[in-house]
Image: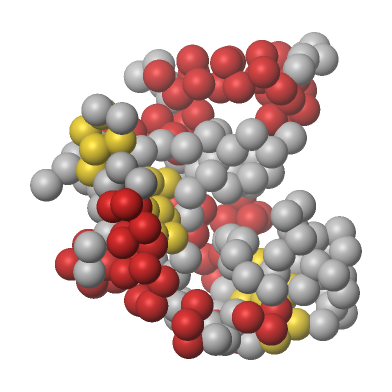
Amino acid sequence: MPLVIKGKKIKSRIIQGGMGVGVSLAPLASAVAKEGGVGVISSAALDRIVGKRIKRKIKIREAVHIEIANAKNMSAGGHLGFKMDQIELESNTLENLLPAVKDMAKIYGDFPVVVAGGIYTRKDIEKFLKMGADGVQMGTRFLATEESSANAAYKSAVVGCAEQDIVVVDPEKNPPGSPCGLPFRIIRQSPMFEGSKFRKPLCNI
């Protein structure tokens, strides 16, 4: 059964995460869409990224139009959502949050509910679809693909990392960090975050 959003049918029920800065651009979004999923373009610093590419200064709205147009051509994480002291609460797992969110969605028009965060394998996808999710969003699995606009060093670091290399950063103790002020996962070797205070992540590679 396809995921339906405002009358549009999404065959695969997979939404690609909008990974910024400069990762989720036209090539990745287009590739995902061509396979029947939802391709997402990150708008984080997109005006600077596209402006550098076309060699002139532009505003974010124009940059978005250019990138979406490119995504439609044949050439075409993450934030954790809770404060540091809330991450390990059993009540905040996807398994416990989904039923209540689905019930609320039914009250307000029965709109589709898409789960995100920790969706890594086909088994994960099937599990949450069976629980009632209308779709899933995946970011990390797309990060190191050929279509991703991340640079080669970034992709290599992601592919080569082990579980102990992934940490959760508290942006309040180690700015600059998440623009929304919430904890997020990074690779330990990132120069920007070396020496920061972190906690063991609740994820599997």
Residue 203 coordinates in the image, percent (x, y): 49, 79
Q: Which residue appears at 23% of the width and 63% of the height? A: 132
The image quadrant of residue 177 is bottom right
Reply above or below: 162 against 148. below
Report the colour scheme.
secondary structure
Counting from the top left corner in percent of width and height, residue 120 is at: 37, 67
Quick one: which residue is furthest to the left in this view? 1
Image quarter for residue 43?
A: top right
Residue 3 lies in quadrant: top left
- In the image, taking residue 66 as reference, residue 84 lies left or right, namely right
Q: Position of residue 154 (x, y in %)?
A: 64, 56
Is residue 157 shown to the viewer in this render? no
Residue 158 seen anywhere in this rendered image of the structure: yes
For the point 59% across and 38% down, the residue is: 42
- Residue at figure coordinates x 69%, y 73% from the top left: 83
Q: Is residue 51 left or right of residue 71?
A: right
Residue at 66 percent of width and 14 percent of height: 62
Number of marks in picture: 0
Residue toward you, 123 or 54: 123
Q: Is residue 106 above or below residue 58?
A: below
15, above or below 140, in the image:
above
Drawn side of residue 159 relative to residue 176, left or right: left
Going by the picture, which residue comes out furthest to the front?
107
